[in-house]
Image (cartoon, rainbow, N blue to C red):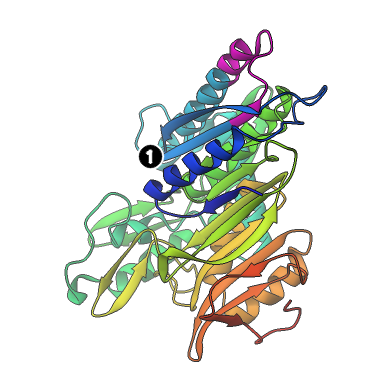
Amino acid sequence: MPRIYYNIPVKRIFRALCAILCAAASAMCGCGGGEESEAADYRYSTIYAMNTSALLVVYDDFSAPGAEEKFARFEGEARGIIAEVENSLSVSKEGSSVLAFNGAEAGAKVEIDVHAYEVLSAAERVYADTDGYYNPAVYYNVSAYGFNGGTFPASEEDIPTDGEIAAYGEIYSRFGELTLTVEGDKYYAIKPSVTAEYGGTVYSMKVDLGGIGKGYAADLIDGLMDEYGYGCGYFSFGTSSIALKRFAGGGDFTLGFTDPRAPWDEYLSAPVSDRCISTSGDYENYFELGGKRYCHIFSPVTGRPVETGIMSATLIGGSAAENDAYTTAIMAMPPEKAAAFIAEKLSSRLAVFTLSAADGLKYFTNIGEGGYTILNGRYTPYVGAENVA
């Protein structure tokens, strides 16, 4: 069973890819319809978008007539889809729907494209489902800490003040007032009328959909692989979202999950196939001041980087876009609430989260016994809630 090292630094992704592709070269392929082929072949493509690398891998019998041309068409369509999503959701590209929304006045009705409409619709659903623990309108809070391409605070005195955070909270707390409409073949977002003033500047709502957008793109590529009849392979967008099919012989992949406090190591592995997967974590994009870690995931409760003790959260199954948002929300929840939320709202998905507790490193999962393997003795089960496997 081949291994995919999931949610790891990019250099290790490509080392892992080489190992997987070498394994595929000697495997038998039963995917793509028809009889089993001779030695499994593969094609892969790397795509840079949304400030990260995406990896597209397909296993098939490429000795068959037209197979190369088919893959070329598939790759071209995949690149086009990813470019469309990036151009729609970018916070900085001219012509993007998100840039148009963010630049509009409070209360404005803004025409957006179908990708922005679908992603905002998913964001609204998860916002409501999580009681606001997922909120893409914490844009100003994230920027104030330097995570939107700015500069991280150089000292504790540079950390945003309570007054600044409170002003931004007046805006993001009204995300639920966003209205989406469809009129004929056009899509619109009506911006909440709320504004807030801080430091002599008046702010209206802005959103950042980059995180959920990667999962949305993974969902689209997953569907495109189905359209082309590619039943074996995967699409990995950055280190957060994967659309996983089957391995070359039709079996499972083994996902190896990164230890959030030792990114060169793994803490858990699980056999997975034909699922979309998303992970959020505090260990890839963060800075430290005074021995304290400040990560890019923000709590809508405090308006500041999360401090729940949850280090990473992974969901397997369902929509990758929704999972991107749900795992962000789980990171912002107290651990006992996160475990209860998974049991109540996400029981159809497989879930894992890690926790830094007073008595050591913990893991929580609803995966049944025998469905996963703990690889790191530093991790013990979290027993602070019911429904712990």
Taking the spot 70% from the left edge, 28% from the top edge, the residue there is 230
Q: Please tell me which residue lies in front, 354 or 255.
A: 255
336 versus 224 height, above or below: below
**Can you tell which quarter of the image residue 171 is in?**
bottom left
How many residues crowd mark 1 within 10 Å: few (<14), some (14–19), many (20+)? some
Q: Please tell me which residue lies in front, 331 or 221.
A: 221
Left or right, residue 80 beside residue 197: right
Residue 182 rendering spot, x and y as whole percentages:
67, 31
Question: In which quadrant is the C terminus drawn?
Answer: bottom right
Q: Verify whether residue 63 appears in magenta.
A: yes
Where disc 1 sits, the SS reads helix
Residue 155 rendering spot, x and y as whole percentages:
17, 73
Q: Verify whether residue 275 appears in magenta.
A: no
Q: Which residues are magenta?
A: 58-74
Q: Please tell me which residue lies in front, 274 or 168.
A: 274
Q: Amino acid at mark 1?
A: Gly
Residue 153 rendering spot, x and y as whole percentages:
21, 66
The reply to whether residue 176 is visible in this rendering is: no
Say which residue label 1 marks: 103
Taking the spot 69% from the left edge, 23% from the top edge, the residue there is 184
Residue 29 rendering spot, x and y as whole percentages:
72, 31
Seen from this angle, which residue lies furthest right?
A: 34
Left or right, residue 159 beside residue 121: left
The reply to whether residue 333 is visible in this rendering is: yes
Left or right, residue 312 beside residue 231: left
